[in-house]
Image (cartoon, helix red, strand yellow):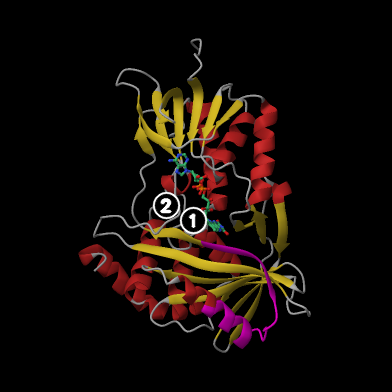
Amino acid sequence: MPELDSHTYDLIFAGGGAAALSLAVQIVQSPLPYRRILIIDPDPKERNDRTWCFWSTAPVFCESTVSHRWNRLAFVSDGVNLHLDTHPYDYRVIRSIDFYRHTLEILKASGRVSFLRASVESIADSDPTSDMATVIAGGIAHRAHWVFDSRWVAVAYRGANPRRHYLQQHFLGWTIRTPNDQFTPDRATLFDLRVPQEGVFRFVYTLPFSTREAMVEYTLFSADLLPPQQYREALETYLQDQLGISEYEILDEESCVIPMTDEEFPRAAGRRIMRIGTLGGRVKASTGYAFLRIQQDSAAIVRSMIERGTPFHNRLPPRRYKTFDAMLLQILFRRGERGKEVFTALFTRNPIGRIFRFLDEVGTVRENLLLMASVPWFLFIRAWFAIRFSKRV
Ligand SMILES: Cc1cc2nc3c(=O)[nH]c(=O)nc-3n(C[C@H](O)[C@H](O)[C@H](O)COP(=O)(O)OP(=O)(O)OC[C@H]3O[C@@H](n4cnc5c(N)ncnc54)[C@H](O)[C@@H]3O)c2cc1C
């Protein structure tokens, strides 16, 4: 490898959030020889800015940062109160601040990673013949053999393709403390659909950390966001009417927008530039979950670099999962009020493991068909025709 000057690196990460930190750690812990790595992000990652949940049967590479886990999940709707045993999966939560501290510590201790607190202005292959890409940040050009771009700002994402769906997962979550015992700490509520739907799929999600402390999130899957006051009012009403909680202290607040879209997010932005994380299409279109997918993607990229010398040789999941996602988005986009019926059928008629495997895009065709047969299939057939022939509208 040629001698590197002060602005030349083996790898540059544009954006230093979940995807960049996950991949950077997996690279420094691998046999890959990269010694000069630069992570550029204006955010120092010193705040707990989000809470990640995911299910898994196996430990993840940042397992020590898991703060809670549940083996029982509740699904609640009108007249339905399911307690689901998730074995062999458990549902885990990671506070982002723990993840940032843990990964930054590993990266700093490796002695291979520098950090630049700046905004990346542009990224391009250096020239058609070179094996470098150039990143402009803070008015300075930095060059690297590979650039991983994960720049993402969480605002409502709307692409321009009229044949695609652009929904958002948007929510307000409060971590609350109550003066009396109110929560069942060994059971998280994945969906409580007993909130007015008003034409849009809405639910409340509760992570109980103790009998008196829980994160309660009012969540919508829809095209448009609400005025801020409406999320607060909905949470207050839910706590009062459904949980009978009127006295509580708000310890923390989390709100956000996650893209739910069947738009393609190309992985390559140049010969030497790979998009990762949300920007690289790692958010599951029909659920908004991305954290475990990002870990798996990081492992696949490292494998590809070791075996092929390029990050781009990754196996794609079967194409049918994109169609399933698009059908659900079409239903939620056109008939949000039917979301409650679809999710209730899904959870009452399938073992939770089958649902997790479906969402992880690893279920067998037979399992997928059983699952599709359990939901109001005419809605999905209609959605399929709409996607196939007229798409979104
Ligand atoms: C509040 C919240 C809760 C979530 N909860 C879950 C969950 O429970 N489970 C789950 O699976 N997924 C969840 N997600 C979705 C997903 O896992 C996260 O969004 C995850 O952080 C995505 O990782 P990322 O690296 O793509 O984006 P981020 O972690 O957002 O990183 C993007 C980085 O790019 C930086 N950046 C932006 N512009 C520039 C620029 N011009 N130059 C340099 N840097 C730039 C930003 O500062 C940021 O650090 C959640 C998302 C949010 C926002």
Q: Earlier in the sequence, mark 1 or mark 2?
A: 2
- Picture layout, residue 84 above or below residue 145: below
- Estimate the x, y position of residue 342 in percent, counting from the top left: 45, 77
Q: Is residue 77 above or below residue 361?
A: below
**Number of residues whose C-alpha sits closer than 10 Å to that of mark 2, classed few (under 14), some (14–19) or many (20 or more):** few
Residue at mark 1: C-beta within 8 A of ligand 1: no
Kind of residue sitting beneath label 1: Glu
The range drawn in magenta is 233-255
Tag 1 secondary structure? loop
Q: Name the one closer to the observer, 274 or 86.
A: 274
Percent coordinates x, y for residue 172 in the rendering:
54, 68
Query: The C terminus is located in which quarter?
Result: bottom left
The quadrant holding residue 222 is: bottom left
Whether 35 is among the magenta residues is no
Residue sitting at x 38%, y 57%: 322
Residue 280 rendering spot, x and y as whole percentages: 42, 45
Residue 235 belongs to magenta span: yes
Q: Is residue 314 above or below residue 246?
A: above
Residue under the image location 35 percent in, 18 percent down: 130
Q: Quadrant of residue 51?
A: bottom right
Image location (x, y in percent) of residue 327 = 35, 66
Residue 318, label in figure: 2
Q: Could you say which disc has been placed on residue 44 in the image?
A: none
Q: Is residue 349 visible?
A: no
| Left or right of residue 9, residue 318 in this image | left
Q: Give the residue displayed 34% in from the left and 50% down from the top.
A: 264
Rendered image quadrant of residue 227: bottom left
Give the CA distance from mark 1 to mark 2.
8 Å
> Which residue is under mark 1?
361
Please report contact status of discs 1 and 2: CB closer than 8 Å, yes or no: yes
Amino acid beneath label 2: Pro
Helix, strand or loop at disc 2? loop
